[in-house]
Image (cartoon, rainbow, N blue to C red):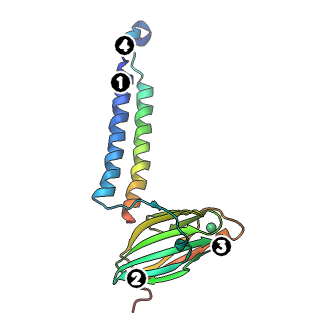
Amino acid sequence: MIDKFERNVIIAALLLSGLFIFSLFYALGARKADVTECLPYDKSYETARVNQIDKTTYQIFYVARMWSFEPAITYIPVGSEVDLFLTSQDVVHGFDIYNKNVNLMGVPGGVAKTTVRFDQPGVYKVVCHEFCGTGHQNMQAEIIVNYPKK
Amino acid sequence: MQASNNPEKFVPRGAIAFFALLVVLGLIIWFGIYFLMLSRI
Ligand SMILES: [Cu+2]
């Protein structure tokens, strides 16, 4: 017969795991949190560019290299939904948008993709958060969302 | 002490309290980060 306390701890651990898993699915479903995808690589991702799909839908194809991101500055309107694609030309780089739920790895030969909405105007800093050499601390980009206001 | 008189009735109060506090700390950290990230969507 299993010890009473051992049994209670197992039940508590299962309940807690259940709560965490439920919260994850709540965030993914009801709150529409986006999860990073890894896309099959092809050479075209090494060309940095911005595509406008419609008024507030954009694609940004970022290329990371020692020690910059391209495109370095992107202007988009408030309320834009942006598909971000990221690859690297040399080593592994990080890609973090300050105060946004975006945290990607730029891997040579790989493509990371996520979707993000910009509802607040402002200058969103992108930084490399994976040490990539002596210029790492200067490796950054900006996404400028309707700022300064017109 | 009662525990030494009757080992069948031993209740590990200290361990239970420690475990409960550990779970509460884990919940605070986990949901702290969870709601921070939800607010950034
Ligand atoms: Cu870097």
Q: Is mark 4 within 8 Å of ligand 1?
A: no
The residue carrying mark 1 is: A7
Left or right: A64, with A35 as reference point? right
Q: Label 4 vs label 3: CA separation? A: 66 Å
Q: Nearer the viewer, residue A110 or A133?
A: A110
The residue carrying mark 2 is: A52
Q: Residue furthest bottom?
A: A150
Which residue is painted at 65% across and 64% down in the image? Answer: A91
- Quadrant of the drawing holding the N terminus of chain A: top left
The residue carrying mark 4 is: B9
Q: Nearer the viewer, residue A43 or B7?
A: A43
Residue A84 quadrant: bottom left
Q: Please state which of the two labelled residues, at mark 4 or mark 3, is closer to the viewer.
A: 3
**What kind of residue is marked 1?**
Arg
Residue A119 quadrant: bottom left
| Image coordinates for residue A131, horizontal then vertical, percent | 65, 62
Which residue is painted at 59% across and 71% down in the image? Answer: A64
Is the same chain shared between marks 2 and 1? Answer: yes
Helix, strand or loop under label 2: strand
Task: Examine the rendered structure and indicate whether residue B14 appears above or below residue A90.
Answer: above
**What kind of residue is marked 3?**
Trp
The residue carrying mark 3 is: A67
Residue A27 quadrant: bottom left
Which residue is painted at 33% across and 57% down in the image? Answer: A28
Tell which subunit mark 4 falls on: B
Q: Label 3 vs label 2: CA separation? A: 26 Å
Q: Are marks 1 and 3 in contact (CB under 8 Å)?
A: no
Q: Please state which of the two labelled residues, at mark 3 or mark 2, is closer to the viewer.
A: 2
Helix, strand or loop under label 4: helix
Q: Please state which of the two labelled residues, at mark 2 or mark 1, is closer to the viewer.
A: 2
Q: Nearer the viewer, residue A136 or A9?
A: A136
